[in-house]
Image (cartoon, helix red, strand yellow):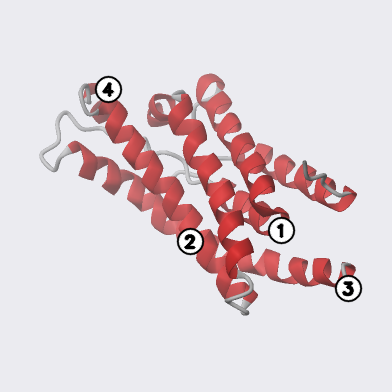
């Protein structure tokens, strides 16, 4: 079993602390919508710097915090419906953490521009998170969508439940993807240079 170094444990602790802070400082585009999160950025940064195992751990923590917040201090009615479901709260975030770490680790030798690769895998992570939340939400509510439509402020939907979910959550995806692609390389590129020097 792989052991984390003191540096990695310190970094992990810092990133977990940031996840806790961002969980309780929500940002919402419009009332009733799920909150915009920077959790995907924190998890992507951790996955790139600590590998898929570290990313998986951070994704699990992020999912747990989302679950706890939805149960205790939900920022919107939609958050209660979505993130009190452990599958929706945990699985997308865990997949994001592991996948971003795995992709970066295996593509780093092929793509030499670190900032480009970091931005690309952060985008993939953001897409996976939103895509899986949309998919799981549809699967859990397709047979009884009334509560979900009410949370969206809709009495009924003529566009189809799946597309309604995709449109509502997609507004957040655009903002989250842009911030991930910009911020993740700005943090990880210089940090990776420092880490590489330490191991020379």
Q: Nearer the viewer, residue 23 or 187?
A: 187
- CA gap, disc 1 to disc 3? 17 Å
Q: Earlier in the sequence, mark 3 or mark 4?
A: 4
Label 4 crowding class (10 Å Cα cut-off): few <14, some 14-19, many 20+? Answer: some
Q: Residue at x 66, y 69 (%)?
A: 186
Q: Nearer the viewer, mark 4 or mark 2?
A: 2
Judged from this view, the residue extending furthest toward the bottom is 112
Q: Residue at x 60, y 36 (%)?
A: 60
Q: Is residue 77 above or below residue 189?
A: above
The picture places residue 166, in percent across and down from the top left corner, at: 29, 46
Q: Earlier in the sequence, mark 1 or mark 3?
A: 1
Q: Earlier in the sequence, mark 1 or mark 4?
A: 1
Q: Earlier in the sequence, mark 2 or mark 3?
A: 2
Q: Nearer the viewer, mark 1 or mark 2?
A: 1
Label 2 crowding class (10 Å Cα cut-off): few <14, some 14-19, many 20+? Answer: many
- Disc 1 marks which residue? 49
Q: Nearer the viewer, mark 1 or mark 4?
A: 1
């Amino acid at each position: 079993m792989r052991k984390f170094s003191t540096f990695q444990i310190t970094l992990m602790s810092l990133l977990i602390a940031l996840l806790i802070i961002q969980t309780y400082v929500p940002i919402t585009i419009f009332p009733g919508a799920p909150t915009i999160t920077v959790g995907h950025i924190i998890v992507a940064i951790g996955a790139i710097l600590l590998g898929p195992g570290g990313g998986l751990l951070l994704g699990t923590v992020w999912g747990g915090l989302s679950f706890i917040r939805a149960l205790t201090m939900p920022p919107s009615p939609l958050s209660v419906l979505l993130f009190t479901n452990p599958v929706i709260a945990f699985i997308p975030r865990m997949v994001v953490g592991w996948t971003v770490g795995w992709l970066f680790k295996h593509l780093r030798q092929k793509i030499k521009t670190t900032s480009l690769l970091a931005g690309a895998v952060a985008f993939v992570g953001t897409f996976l998170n939103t895509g899986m939340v949309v998919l799981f939400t549809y699967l859990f509510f397709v047979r009884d969508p009334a509560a979900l439509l009410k949370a969206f402020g809709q009495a009924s939907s003529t566009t189809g439940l799946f597309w309604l979910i995709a449109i509502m959550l997609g507004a957040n995806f655009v903002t989250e993807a842009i911030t991930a692609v910009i911020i993740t390389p700005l943090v990880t590129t210089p940090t990776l240079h420092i880490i590489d020097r330490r191991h020379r």
